[in-house]
Image: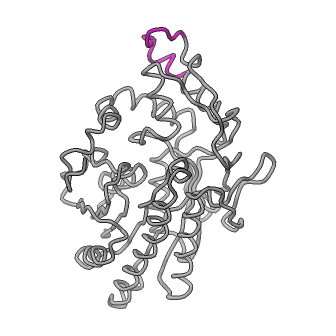
Amino acid sequence: MMRILVTGGAGFIGSALIRQLIQHSSHTVLNLDKLTYAGNLESLACVADSPRYQFSQTDICDAAALVSQIQQFQPDLIMHLAAESHVDRSIDGPANFIHTNIVGTYTLLEACRHYWSGLVPERKTAFRFHHVSTDEVYGDLGDTSEPSTETTPYSPSSPYSASKASSDHLVRAWQRTYGLPTLVSNCSNNYGPFHFPEKLIPHIILNALQGRPLPVYGSGEQIRDWLYVEDHARALLAVAVHGRIGETYNIGGNNEKQNLDVVRSICAILDELTPAKPVGVDQYADLITFVEDRPGHDRRYAIDTSKMSSELGWRPQETFDSGLRKTVRWYLENTSWWQRVLNGTYRLDRIGNQA
């Protein structure tokens, strides 16, 4: 039984991880989250009353607050998920990504190093820092290249992926230089319940339900590997607890799909599950609309997950078809959650009174 501090725990992946920890383990969790637009405490409503769960509205760039929270909570494990993560937003405004993903990670590493160096020998040996990153740091693979491994050179293309690559390098440097016991994991595209609607799969589901155009960048031939978020949460805990210090682990769903095929699959499931369509819509696929591609759009990401399976015995439990069907059903059955996100009311009356 451990005391686990999770940064960014009100985000999509962070909330899935915390639900996993509270519902399926005996660990105690402190969730540190700034509550930006992507942080939603309603995603944690099912565990909010647990005596093993705590929340603090804390910015990882606030060094004094971090030191205070870490010293008070006395974690055995820190899992760092707080990040700006939307590529389109990074193109329009890269400054927030540099500040949060790079400066924030540095600030957290220094607070952790200060805390870790003061632990008694037994706790110091057991302590771990797990940094959660993305497959986008490896860059565009092209159609014929083998999937990226943990030793593939970095070649980020967007301000987002460049900022995450920078944070990965900082974590490894703190391990090499100071001996801080760190691990890094790089994941492929996540999807599943509680996903913020700006991302592809929830955006397509919700637009379709409202009879709005389903925008697809360029020709829609970009390829991504899709990982069900609850599979990712299980993998993260495996890495954090059983991974080897100083190592990197790629976590993927082994589901390479073209974006256009993903959109068409969503439409097919919705055609089946929601026969009563919006006015004027015969089939949801009729709403597909091709739009101008975004700058520097990588064609393909894919990662080799053999290290996860051989060393840690982890494999995804969901296929893309089963995970996508679960995801669509969740959005159909949880309209109040996503309607509050779309109209902005999820940001009202929460800690800090953010509007």
Magenta span includes 275:
yes
Q: Please state which of residues 290 and 43 is positioned toward the viewer in this rendering.
A: 290
Q: Residue at x 81, y 48 (%)?
A: 144
Q: Main secondary structure of the magenta part?
A: loop
Q: Is residue 34 left or right of residue 279?
A: left
> Which span is picked out in magenta?
268-282
Please tell me whether residue 88 is drawn above or below residue 178 in the rendered image.
above
Q: Position of residue 178 (x, y in %)?
A: 50, 88
Q: Is residue 353 left or right of residue 254?
A: left
Quarter of the image holding residue 193?
A: top left
Q: Please state which of residues 68 and 96 is positioned toward the viewer in this rendering.
A: 96
Q: Is residue 285 left or right of residue 354?
A: right
Q: Is residue 83 left or right of residue 163?
A: left
Q: Residue at x 55, y 64 (%)?
A: 163
Q: Position of residue 327 (x, y in %)?
A: 45, 34
Q: Position of residue 312 (x, y in %)?
A: 55, 63
Q: Position of residue 282 (x, y in %)?
A: 53, 9
